[in-house]
Amino acid sequence: MRRRGLGLGAVLALWLLAGAVAQALPLRRGVALSRWFEASAGAPVSAAELRALRAAGFDHVRIPVDPVSLGWSPQRGPTLDDARLRAAIDATLAAGLDAIVDLHPREQTKQAIERGGEWADGYVALWKALATKWKALPAQRVAFELYNEPGFYGWTGGLAWSRYQQRLVAAVRGVDRERVLIVSGRKGGSLEGLVELAPLDDDKLVYSFHYYLPYVFTHQGASWMRGDEWTTAGHWRSVRYPAKAAQARLPHTDGGVGRDRARAEIADYFRDGWDRERIAAQWKPLREWAARHKVRVHCGEFGTIREGVDPASRYRWIGDVRALAEAEGWGWSVWNYADDFGLTANSNTSGAPRGALEPAALRALGLDAHGQGARGQGSPAAARQRGEPATREPRQGAR
């Protein structure tokens, strides 16, 4: 039987419809607004700051929220005081930015959830209640991130996390089937945790990973990393990136960790030759996993500490990770706007105004003073990520 072809008008209409769906909540270039709700006092971001972020070229912000700081506990039931959070979401949308609402439990809360019982059940119930309460938020502009950096380490952790994340997704989907949900792998939301995950049958899920390797560079001197069983990063200073730049000026430790262990870690940094190519090679399993499962990937966190770090090295690493994500067609959200890993001029100055975004930060993120995005967003991989024809002309952005 001879089949009638679609007319040009119908083809164009279908193409435009596909583009409209793909463009809804693109999550291409984002920044985390930490400390807004992570602590009880908070550090609100002003409407002017939000407008400046949009003007710089960001299309979304990630709002980390510690539910306990807003009054949630399983004993109280599935409720929290979300008045300030709703106001923050409204201000974000009014500034022309989309939003990821990221439930960001503190470590003690995550440990309680991962043991199971009332905390695990209570957190699922909380998401069901929030999905109901927040259903009126525009699905094309607000995504929900269900659980920041799940641990679930150990031999049985993979299965336990997979089952628990399915419960969280089901809790929201029972109420809201249109919302974009951000999900992740275990092991701290890492690349390694993500690639062992079996994707769910849900085309509105975005699979997030956080990337901070090598820690000896990105977390050098971090006070909270001293004594960590996995890395000596908290005891290092003056580590430069890429590794060949580090060799020109040897780093040093504060002596607060075993010398042999520290020497071994920095030797690994030099031996592995950490640079953009090394990072790209490490991402190969994720690239293959995403292609195999045909899922959407988002680099939900990446960044480096500020204090005591060579600025050129810092922004070179940030620029490399950002460029690699865009080359794959993956959106990103840098950690973070201000504070220890911040991008603003006064990020480390206690009590001072945050100040403007540093020009070097904008350049590293492929943004410029006119709010144009990175050239990588016009790549064939990026077009596939958005559901656009790969033959379209690339977008012109900052050079």
Image (cartoon, rainbow, N blue to C red):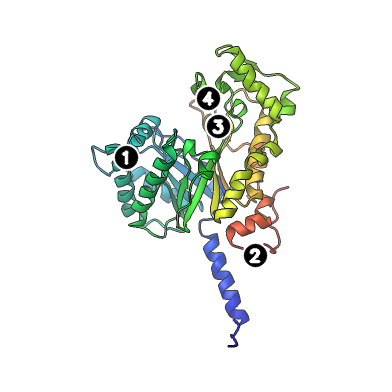
Q: Which residue is mark 3?
A: 341
| Disc 3 element | loop
* Marked residue nearer the N-terminal end (2 or 4): 4
Q: CA distance from mark 3 to mark 4?
A: 20 Å
Name the residue at the bottom extreme.
Answer: 1
Q: Are marks 2 and 3 in contact (CB under 8 Å)?
A: no
Q: Amino acid at mark 2?
A: Pro
* Marked residue nearer the N-terminal end (2 or 1): 1
Q: Which residue is mark 2?
A: 389
| Disc 1 element | helix
Q: Residue at x 59, y 17 (%)?
A: 261
Q: Which residue is mark 4?
A: 230
Between disc 2 and disc 4, the foreground one is 4
Q: Which residue is mark 1?
A: 120
Q: CA distance from mark 2 to mark 4?
A: 44 Å
Rendering quarter of residue 237: top right
Which percent across, then down, holds residue 227? 50, 18
Closer to us: 204 or 358? 204
Q: Residue at x 29, y 42 (%)?
A: 121
